Image: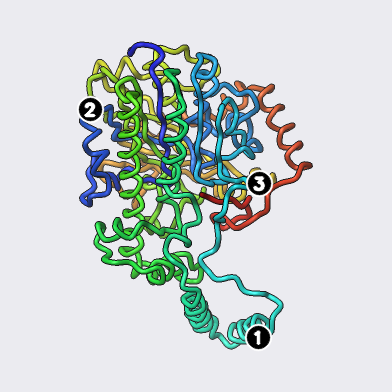
């Protein structure tokens, strides 16, 4: 499509929802730069991830593979698995990745393969670690022991909720005494730091085509945006204590959705401010590419690994317990030099992103890829009806644990109008009409839309069967052996991330 040897920049933004981007209809000014880039790009209104969360999403983006294709006990990329990176590496591209301390986008899960430069910020040079929003407390001191006794007593007396509220307020007052600046509360490297590293790497290139991947975490919880972006989202001047208090409230497991809704609007504004900061830094990255005379011959793609829930279905964050639209529909902007801009309405699984990009770069597509290129259809402005499939292991919140990986499959088949969700854990399936019920509040009765239901069930059945019949046994074995090797070698220190135990990391 475009002359060969063009470079490629891929930006993945953790937790970025499609419906919170201006170029996809959001009313708030979260993406002013991307809004200007969209009219010269391919914009996908229905880009759908292949899995939720990150560890079930990224294999499809990088390796054009369904997340469970190698078996539910395999997480991440297999050693020597063909990927977008390895293909471009073989074509003579310089390759680099800067990932903002997400433990699932790390060497631990094989994402360093084929990169000349790989920084996941889990190294000795790092100096800021993901931390809880609650202040640490010595569990063995007198105050902690007294708190536990009071907690037990209050629960026996039926006063547990009252005690929980009092203890929460007490923890927040303790946290206020630390007087930490907002910047120190951020558990991940911010987008400007990632772009700084990318700038230095790009400046060292000497005419060689390159593939650069940035994974940004500014939209991931806890939500600690830049103060100026928070003001742009209508939050006024947010102090560190206010932001910490909102994040701590939002993270409470003892509150129901009714009480949490009181904080929802303020929390969403913090999230939106994080999107705005990402947009600002993407604009800076593009300006760097322009200054280095690389932009005119550079393919640029921006998308997300999954979305984020804000009580739409009484949940928060992005646990693998549902496949609702706020979690699976993400933005996708693909800017290709010389290509006519297009607005794509048909469902587009991110499984097809790597082959579509390689086709645009006039680069061979590996036979091992599950996805196919849609360049021809997009150029011809043709619609298509192939649905997107999304899968994960229900409630696998700790991919570091083999036992956690071995649960039941959660599978969805989504076309432009309908979505069928099959919950193998509970043994039921629901069909939604997204035109009449975009919020997925009322599954269609079993005796309606029989032909549609039957067709989507047939696709789901074929997918599950092919997951077994077409499994690459070599890649599977290599992955399992890699897991064994990792289990017997030293690992980095551990911390809490998304409510599970994961390697610590830092940023500078």
Q: Is residue 24 visible?
A: no
Q: Secondary structure at mark 1?
A: helix
Q: Is residue 231 visible?
A: yes
Left-right relation of 455 to 23: right
Say which label, 2 or 1, has the lower sequence index. Answer: 2
Sort mark 2 into few (<14), some (14-19) or many (20+) by Cα contacts within 10 Å: some
Q: Secondary structure at mark 3?
A: loop
**Residue 146 got which mark?**
1
Of 370 and 22, nearer the camera is: 22
What is the C-alpha distance between the residues marked 3 and 2?
41 Å
Report the mark closest to the observer, 2 or 1.
2
Task: Name the spot of residue 213 as percent of width and height, x first.
Answer: 46, 32
Q: Is residue 2 above or below residue 311?
A: above
What is the C-alpha distance between the residues marked 1 and 3?
34 Å
Within the image, what quadrant is residue 300 found in? top left
Q: Which residue is mark 2?
A: 40
Sort mark 3 into few (<14), some (14-19) or many (20+) by Cα contacts within 10 Å: some
Task: Name the spot of residue 287 as percent of width and height, x first.
Answer: 30, 34
Q: Which residue is mark 3?
A: 400
């Amino acid at each position: 499509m475009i002359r060969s040897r063009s470079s490629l920049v891929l930006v993945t933004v953790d937790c970025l929802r499609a419906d919170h981007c201006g170029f996809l209809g959001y009313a708030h000014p979260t993406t002013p730069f991307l809004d200007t880039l969209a009219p010269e790009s391919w914009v996908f209104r229905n880009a759908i991830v292949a899995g939720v969360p990150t560890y079930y999403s990224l294999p499809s983006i990088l390796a054009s593979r369904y997340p469970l294709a190698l078996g539910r006990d395999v997480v991440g990329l297999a050693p020597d698995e063909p990927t977008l990176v390895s293909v471009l590496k073989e074509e003579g591209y310089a390759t680099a990745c800067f990932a903002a301390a997400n433990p699932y986008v790390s060497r631990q899960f094989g994402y360093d393969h084929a990169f000349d430069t790989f920084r996941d910020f889990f190294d000795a040079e790092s100096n800021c670690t993901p931390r809880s929003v609650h202040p640490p407390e010595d569990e063995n001191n007198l105050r902690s022991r007294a708190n536990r006794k009071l907690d037990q007593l209050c629960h026996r007396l039926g006063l547990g909720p009252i005690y929980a509220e009092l203890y929460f307020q007490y923890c927040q007052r303790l946290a206020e005494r630390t007087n930490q600046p907002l910047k120190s509360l951020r558990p991940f490297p911010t987008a400007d730091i990632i772009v700084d590293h990318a700038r230095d790497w790009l400046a060292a290139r000497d005419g060689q085509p390159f593939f650069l991947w940035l994974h940004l975490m500014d939209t991931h919880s806890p939500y600690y945006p830049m103060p100026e972006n928070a003001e742009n989202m209508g939050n006024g001047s947010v102090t560190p204590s206010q932001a910490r208090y909102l994040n701590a409230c939002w993270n409470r497991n003892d509150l129901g959705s009714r009480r949490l809704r009181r904080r929802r609007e303020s929390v969403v504004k913090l999230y939106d401010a994080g999107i705005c900061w990402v947009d600002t830094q993407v604009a800076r990255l593009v300006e760097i590419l322009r200054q280095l005379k690389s932009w005119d011959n550079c393919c640029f793609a921006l998308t997300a690994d999954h979305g984020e829930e804000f009580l739409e279905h009484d949940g928060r964050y992005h646990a693998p317990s549902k496949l609702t639209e706020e979690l699976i529909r993400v933005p996708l902007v693909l800017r290709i030099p010389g290509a006519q801009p297009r607005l794509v309405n048909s469902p587009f699984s991110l499984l097809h992103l790597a082959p579509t990009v390689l086709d645009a770069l006039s680069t061979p597509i590996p036979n091992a890829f599950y996805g196919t290129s849609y360049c021809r259809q997009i150029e011809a402005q043709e619609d298509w009806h192939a649905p997107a499939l999304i899968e994960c292991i229900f409630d696998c919140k700790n991919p570091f644990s083999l036992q956690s990986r071995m649960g039941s499959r959660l599978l969805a088949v989504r076309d432009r109008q309908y979505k069928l969700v099959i919950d193998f854990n509970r043994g039921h399936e629901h069909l939604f009409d997204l035109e009449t019920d975009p919020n997925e509040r009322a599954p269609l009765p079993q005796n309606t839309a029989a032909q549609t239901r039957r067709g989507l069930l047939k696709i789901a059945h074929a997918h599950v069967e092919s997951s077994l019949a077409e499994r690459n046994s070599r890649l599977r074995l290599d992955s399992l052996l890699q897991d064994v090797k990792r289990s017997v070698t030293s690992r980095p220190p551990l911390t809490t991330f998304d409510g599970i135990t994961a390697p610590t990391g830092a940023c500078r």
